[in-house]
Image (spheres, rainbow, N blue to C red):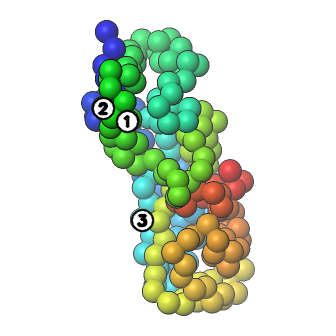
Amino acid sequence: MATKSGIYWVTWANAHAKNSNKVDDLEITFENGVKTFVKALTDAGATVDISTTKKVIKEHIFFTGLGKLHKVSVNHLRQKKIAVDIEWDHGDLTKSKAGALEMVNGFGLAVPPRSINPPSLTSNHINGKAVDMTIKWTGTIKVKKKDRSEVSVTYSLNVNTNIVLHSIGVSYGVKKLKTDAPHWSYNGR
């Protein structure tokens, strides 16, 4: 029997398919780049909040775009004998949207304007080659690139447009996906 979309599925996923926010869970080469990039940022006075590193199932299983169950993922879960039967239609449009929004918020999905990308079944997070992080500081700081050269970088509310910060990340092998505020990866996707 289907269970309506909503916070239940966030709780279920946290119990049965927990994502990681630990840098140590990343693929080793990318892990080293992230660690040194984050150290350079914090040494310069920035704060870095890492929300997600390696992802297991969560939105990759539940969503292909908001509010749509991905059939391939359901088949994958059924093969593992994990029952996922989400009822998206609550019989009322307002209630249906509220249930989907509970899941969006509960999974911490970056939705417009922070991201224009739907969750992906081929995400670099699944292979431990992506990290979602929020980087903040005040004014202008001087951050060392991997080659130890120092670069002045001014804080911008829109991290997607901060090309100086992006170039620092690239020096460590950590590339910005410019359409998703928290997302950095080994290849910028």
Q: Position of residue 97 (x, y in %)?
A: 37, 35
Q: Position of residue 179 (x, y in %)?
A: 63, 57
Q: Badge 2 local density, few (<14 within 10 Å), some, or many (20+)?
A: some
Mark 3: secondary structure: strand
The answer to which quarter of the image holds residue 152 is bottom right
The answer to which quarter of the image holds residue 90 is top left
Query: Which residue is disc 1 drawn over?
Result: 97
Measure the C-alpha gap from mark 3 to mark 1.
Answer: 29 Å
| Residue at 56% from the left image edge and 32% from the top image edge | 64
Along the line of sight, the residue nearer the viewer: 159 or 113: 113
Measure the C-alpha gap from mark 2 to mark 1.
Answer: 5 Å
Given the image, on which type of amino acid does mark 2 rest? Lys
Mark 1: secondary structure: helix
Given the image, on which type of amino acid does mark 1 rest? Lys
Measure the C-alpha gap from mark 2 to mark 3.
Answer: 33 Å
Q: Position of residue 161 (x, y in %)?
A: 64, 71
Can residue 68 be seen here?
yes
**Marks 3, 1: nearer the viewer:** 1
| Residue at 28% from the left image edge and 35% from the top image edge | 7
**Marks 2, 3: nearer the viewer:** 2
Q: In the displayed structure, would residue 73 be above or below residue 14?
A: above
Contact flag, marks 2 and 1 (Cβ < 8 Å): yes
- Of callouts 3 and 1, the N-terminal one: 3
160 sits to left or right of 93 = right
| Residue at 46% from the left image edge and 76% from the top image edge | 136
Query: Which residue is disc 3 drawn over?
Result: 49
